[in-house]
Image (cartoon, grey):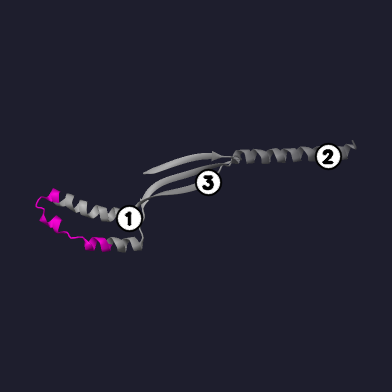
Amino acid sequence: MYKLYLFQYQNSVIYDIEFKRRQCSEDNVQEFLHLVNQVTWQEVYVESDGNAKFSTFVDVFLPCYTNVFPVKSVHMRDTIKIKWLTQGIKYSSKRMRLHDNQRKTTVMENKRIWNV
């Protein structure tokens, strides 16, 4: 199960993801194998019905599994900057700057020519 939280802070969006997973490490696996080897499976073999065998197996197996591999909540957080200065704004700004430079150059040139 995943939970996604979004927060907006100044010029960024914060993604906070929470999910649950089992903690699995080499030590946990070794401990699990040790526990499973210590279980007597006789009560599973005694059952004659397939469904009863499965239920007994799950009743014996599941406590070992849940004790060794506990469920932990994991949080992942990522921050993404909001870029409000888009490509269109940048392009328009560049064009306006070129236009202003052209206008200023023309005015200065005219002043020099006409001695104004």
Whether the residues at callouts 2 and 3 have beta carbons within 8 Å, the answer is no
Q: Quadrant of the N terminus?
A: top left
Q: Earlier in the sequence, mark 2 or mark 3?
A: 3
The magenta segment is 33-52
Q: Residue at x 67, y 39 (%)?
A: 93
Q: Residue furthest right?
A: 115
Look at the magenta stretch and give its main secondary structure: helix
Tag 3: residue type? Thr
Eyeballing the image, is 35 above or below 112? below
Residue beneath disc 1: 69
Q: Residue at x 37, y 48 (%)?
A: 20
Looking at the rendered structure, the secondary structure element under dot 3 is: strand
Q: Residue at x 82, y 37 (%)?
A: 107
Instruction: Say which mark, if any, is on residue 79.
Output: 3
Q: Earlier in the sequence, mark 3 or mark 1?
A: 1
Tag 2: residue type? Met
Few, some or many C-alpha atoms within 10 Å of disc 3 (few <14, some 14-19, many ≥20)? Answer: some
> x%, y% of residue 2?
39, 44
* Nearest to viewer (mark 1 / mark 2): 1
* Nearest to viewer (mark 2 / mark 3): 3
Q: Earlier in the sequence, mark 1 or mark 2?
A: 1
Q: Quadrant of the C terminus?
A: top right
Residue beneath disc 2: 108
Looking at the rendered structure, the secondary structure element under dot 1 is: loop
Q: Residue at x 14, y 59 (%)?
A: 42
